[in-house]
Image: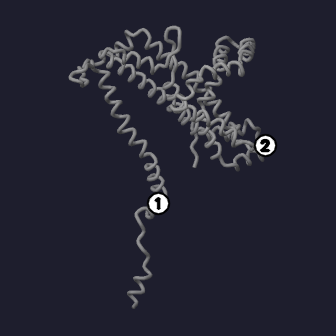
Amino acid sequence: MKKDKKTAEKKPALSWYKRMDFSKKTALWGFIFLLPWLIGLIFFFLRPMVNMLWYSMCSMEMVNGKFTGTFIGIENFKWALGVNPNYNRMLAEAFTNMVKEVPFQIFLALFIAMLLNGEYKGRGFFRAVFVIPIILATGVATFSLREVKTVVETTSEAVMNMDWLKDLVINSGIPEDLTTLLVTYVENIFTVVTTCGVQVLLFLSGLQAISPTLYEVAKMEGCTQFETFCKITLPMVSPTILVCLVYSIAESFAKAQVSYGDSKIAFSAFIRQITFNGNQAYYGYGAAMSFIYFAATLVTIGVVCGIVSKGVFYYD
């Protein structure tokens, strides 16, 4: 009877998950959430990237309905960087546009997020307004709105005429180089707003993660709004700034518009036009241009992250 009583009182064995400590559980769930991305990276990104690198070092041709490549080393890269009269200029223009656009985009996204994070009536409506650009950026919505593009552009020019603001900047006595940059920002203000929806959401989540007690202590100590922003808000959202920088740089390169003749063309469209011009010999040439552009984007993100990460404040 005693043995039966002890057996009945014996607790059931814990499962392997319940025996794990909190840090291991967190790591496990982090891996689970990353698993779809890892699957996509391995099966849908790494293989095309390796193929692109191989094509870029080959002279491609169609044999019996199948692409075959003859290894020629870095000749395609020499042709892209040393012979093509437009590629280097377009690459430099894409980089210059990124340097001009991304800082302003980050500043504007943080400013909008701070406004949306305030306590006032109708806050949910205004937050939804800044999510709309994310929805409109999808392929289906873009295709549906393509037919009314001319009407929208005409209406925006009539209703939101920014010539007065450009004249104000030009006649303000600011140095010419800075004036040119400010005029560019003014001309592209609506484009920048419609492309910073993701950054606004990221900053908004970062601001809401800041403990209100920090602001209460700062207020009790007599800190001004500017001091509170510099000493509390900015350090606390610095990890989010790093994430937004990576996203904004990648998006800027992906959607770069460069000068081609008398008009603007997407850099990716220029590479596609060169690659699929009907001549199979250009497949390797186009792959080389794509790989150079990809490498330039990756190096830029790495350098910026290396510099900015030194000033990022991580807190528990």
Question: Quarter-wise, where is residue 142 in the image?
Answer: top right
Q: Residue at x 68, y 18 (%)?
A: 157
Relative depth, front residue between 227 and 87:
87
Question: Quarter-wise, where is residue 294 in the image?
Answer: top left
Relative depth, front residue between 129 and 305:
129
**Which residue carries the number 1 mark?**
21
Q: Nearer the viewer, mark 1 or mark 2?
A: 1
The reply, left or right, for residue 126 in relation to residue 94 is: right
Residue lying at the far bottom in this picture: please name it. Answer: 1
Q: Residue at x 35, y 20 (%)?
A: 288
Q: Quadrant of the N terminus?
A: bottom left
Relative depth, front residue between 265 and 309:
265
- For the residues marked 1 and 2, what is the alpha-carbon distance in whole angstroms? 42 Å
**Which residue carries the number 2 mark?**
222
Q: Residue at x 32, y 19 (%)?
A: 283
Image x and y of residue 307, in percent: 52, 30
Could you tell me which secondary element the residue under label 2 belongs to? loop
Image x and y of residue 11, in percent: 44, 76
Disc 1 marks which amino acid?
Asp
The reply, left or right, for residue 243 in relation to residue 179 is: left
The reply, left or right, for residue 104 in relation to residue 60 is: right
Image x and y of residue 309, in percent: 53, 35
Q: Residue at x 70, y 49 (%)?
A: 212
Could you tell me which secondary element the residue under label 1 belongs to? loop
Answer whether labels 1 and 2 touch (C-beta < 8 Å). no
Image x and y of residue 312, in percent: 57, 38
Q: Is residue 309 above or below residue 104?
A: below
Mark positioned earlier in the residue sequence (1 or 2): 1
Disc 2 marks which amino acid?
Gly
